[in-house]
Image (spheres, rainbow, N blue to C red):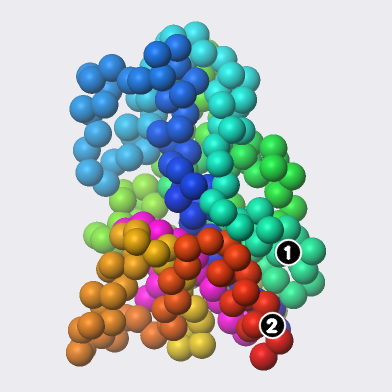
Amino acid sequence: MKTLMVFDFDHTVVDDNSDTWVVRCLPGQTLPDSIKNSYRKGHWTEFMGRVMNYIGDQEVSPDRVRNVMETIPFTAGMTDLLTFISQNKNTIDCIVISDSNTMFIDWILCAAGLKAAVDRVFTNPAKVNELGYVEVQCYHSHECDRCPVNLCKKKVLELYLSEQSGGGVEYERIFYVGDGGNDLCPTSCLRGHDVVMPRKGYTLEKLLAKLEGQEDNTTLRARVLAWSSGTDILQELKASMQS
């Protein structure tokens, strides 16, 4: 029986937001107000499409974008945690579910030599189009009214678990590691012996505390354990493998 590690990416694996970090590739490292003010709640991926178009219009090459993305800092202890996971692939599966995009995540993990740690990445598809611009599309559509229009992480996790189960893989324990509001939805499909790990001081921790405080809480069964570095997660992972 394997362990499954599920990670969010921005402010979890990396210590910043990859989608806002990309602005550093612009000569003035800032966006015009017309683009900044065009964001609508729940429609982040469409907004990022406009950001990447603007970056392309400024004749910033995909190679320049990549070089900048490769400088984003990892959260403390995360590289050690991912290295441990990559050394224990016979007992640990690891997936990333993120509202970033395939190119950013791939570039960042490859530059750090950590691609081998992650089995699958579920995120918005990105490619370099015929104009030489990075183009981002929505991951999927869904019926969940709690999540951004382009990504319901619960739907992704449920589909992954059902595919794995169909292939004969069941997980003894699932660790879900995240920080944001869009990480709340998938925690409802975790079981009593699974662990949800919110980053200390971030939105997910506050939302889970609210849920735990409700007398009629039926959605959260997993144990909640907050973390502030990858070292905290690694200790918990090692302890669970020995128990």
Is 44 in the magenta?
Answer: no
Q: Amino acid at mark 1?
A: Phe
| Residue 161 in which image quadrant | bottom right
Is 183 in the magenta?
Answer: yes
| Residue 128 in which image quadrant | top right
Q: Amino acid at mark 2?
A: Met
Sequence-first tag of 2 and 1: 1
| Residue picked out by circle 2 | 241
Question: Relative to 52, is 189 above or below?
Answer: below
| Residue picked out by circle 1 | 84
Q: Quadrant of the C terminus?
A: bottom right
Q: Secondary structure at mark 2?
A: helix
Residue 99: give its label. none
- Residue segment shown in magenta: 171-189
Q: Is residue 62 left or right of residue 191?
A: right
- Residue at 26% across, 61% down: 146
- Residue at 56% across, 76% down: 174
Q: Secondary structure at mark 1?
A: helix
Question: Relative to 76, is 33 above or below?
Answer: above
Residue 82: x %, y % from top left: 67, 58
Tag count: 2
Residue 37: x %, y % from top left: 21, 27
